[in-house]
Amino acid sequence: MKKAVCLISGGLDSYVAATIAKHNGYSIFALTLRYGQKNNREISCAKKISAKLQAEEHLILDIDLSWVDSALTNKKIQIANTYPLSEIPATYVPARNTIFISLAIAFAETIDAEEIYLGINSVDFSGYPDCKPEYIKKFQSLLNVATKKTCEGRHIKLNAPLINLSKSEIIKEGDKLKVDFSITWSCYRNNEKPCGICPSCILREKGFKEANIKDLAIKNK
Amino acid sequence: MKKAVCLISGGLDSYVAATIAKHNGYSIFALTLRYGQKNNREISCAKKISAKLQAEEHLILDIDLSWVDSALTNKKIQIANTYPLSEIPATYVPARNTIFISLAIAFAETIDAEEIYLGINSVDFSGYPDCKPEYIKKFQSLLNVATKKTCEGRHIKLNAPLINLSKSEIIKEGDKLKVDFSITWSCYRNNEKPCGICPSCILREKGFKEANIKDLAIKNK
């Protein structure tokens, strides 16, 4: 069976992307990073998601990024409820996707996977540089010369199937594939329940509303 | 003062590269990865090297790569004394440089550094894909679209000043810049003294011999 490495954050995008991988006939090798994010509920959600996906393996790696300049990791920087739309928000984590994708490449090479599925998308959070089609294109070009496997002529493909979808389109796609959104977590904060007012909560609420689908996560938390 | 992030492994190449950075007027921000390498003497050498370089900061990060397919990390794979020259050796660590450079980028963006100095070189270990000029070129191209900083028009340069040098040329360059080779460690094994017979020890010995310089590390170990 073909293998895919799926970066699973605990949020809904990466879960939908991994579900597409499964739908495409791949066995799933899940990879989750515990990087010092303030919100550590993501990790328990990632475990539930991997179980739901019947992942062959779920690799959870620790890499401390609490020293980077980001509201998501650095205790000195507050998570605001709004950010100026013209700027890259303070929740941007320097090189996060580049670090995560590098680790996914090491995993893919080690288990001989053909694809790496990513939940990144650029429509709603258009500010993040490492969520854009151009970024994936350049990373693929690097990957083609970066590893033993790719230099021996075997391809590892970076696949970001949601890259051009809005949050509501992602939710609709997930709903079609019977994704269980109730086990996902989007809130930037680390409360018992999603705060409902951070940019990630707002975007999620808007997405479900536009998709005309009920968000079952709220009552379960 | 201009800042440079220098990946410091504890070996001699990265020390020479960082010394070039210092010579070029940069203040040094050292980054060392404890990634589950069997040889952990590298780390104590990296500390000594950072002290010698009077680094502003020495960030030592832990990332467990003991699960990857490499003789340097996986206890099930032996470190051989010779490898077929036609193949990428078993000491190749999947995506290691890609992971390390990604973390260096996060560091560079956080402290607002202009350059990242790397000790990689492709002349002697020509098998490693992630030590070639083409690899650095593609990574630079990715980096230019990957971060908040680079998307805002500020450049972070990947600088691999040794990339086209042989081991003996690197040693001569280091000698000229008064690098203290006695505090470096090259051996793949984790003995009290360098084993003298692994590919890395052999290459080091050959390099010093060709450069006609005495390797003071041997007697100090």
Image (cartoon, coloured by chain):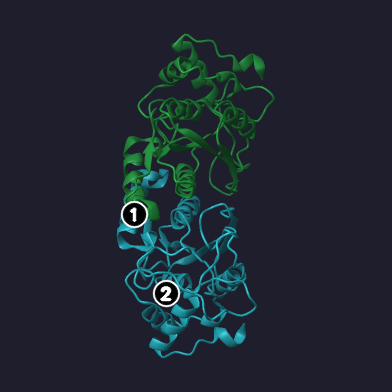
Chain colours: A cyan, B green
Above-or-below relation of B35 to A6: above
- Residue drawn at the location 33% of the way across and 35% of the way down: B133
In this view, the residue in front, B80 or B47, is B47
Do callouts 2 and 1 mark residues in contact (Cβ within 8 Å)? no
The answer to whether residue B72 of the structure is visible from this angle is no
Q: Chain of mark 1?
A: B
Tell me where residue A70 appears, x and y as whole percent: 51, 59
- Residue drawn at the location 69% of the way across and 24% of the way down: B192
Residue A84, by quadrant, is: bottom left
Looking at the rendered structure, the secondary structure element under dot 1 is loop
Tell me where residue A91 appears, x and y as whole percent: 48, 64
Indicate the amino acid at tag 1.
Glu
Residue A118, by quadrant, is: bottom left
Residue furthest to the front: B1
Instruction: Say few, some or many: other residues with alpha carbon within 10 Å of mark 1 (under 14 / 14 to 19 / 20 or more).
Output: few
Tell me where residue B180 appears, x and y as whole percent: 55, 19
Instruction: Say few, some or many: other residues with alpha carbon within 10 Å of mark 2 (under 14 / 14 to 19 / 20 or more).
Output: few
Above-or-below relation of A73 to A143: below
**Marks 2 and 1, how far apart in space?**
38 Å
Which residue does the numbered mark 1 point to in the structure image? Answer: B152
Q: Chain of mark 2?
A: A
Above-or-below relation of B200 to B136: above
Quadrant for the N terminus of chain A in the image: bottom left
Looking at the rendered structure, the secondary structure element under dot 2 is helix
The answer to whether residue B198 of the structure is visible from this angle is yes
Q: What numbered label is drawn on residue A23?
A: 2
Q: Is residue A150 left or right of residue B35?
A: left
Indicate the amino acid at tag 2.
His
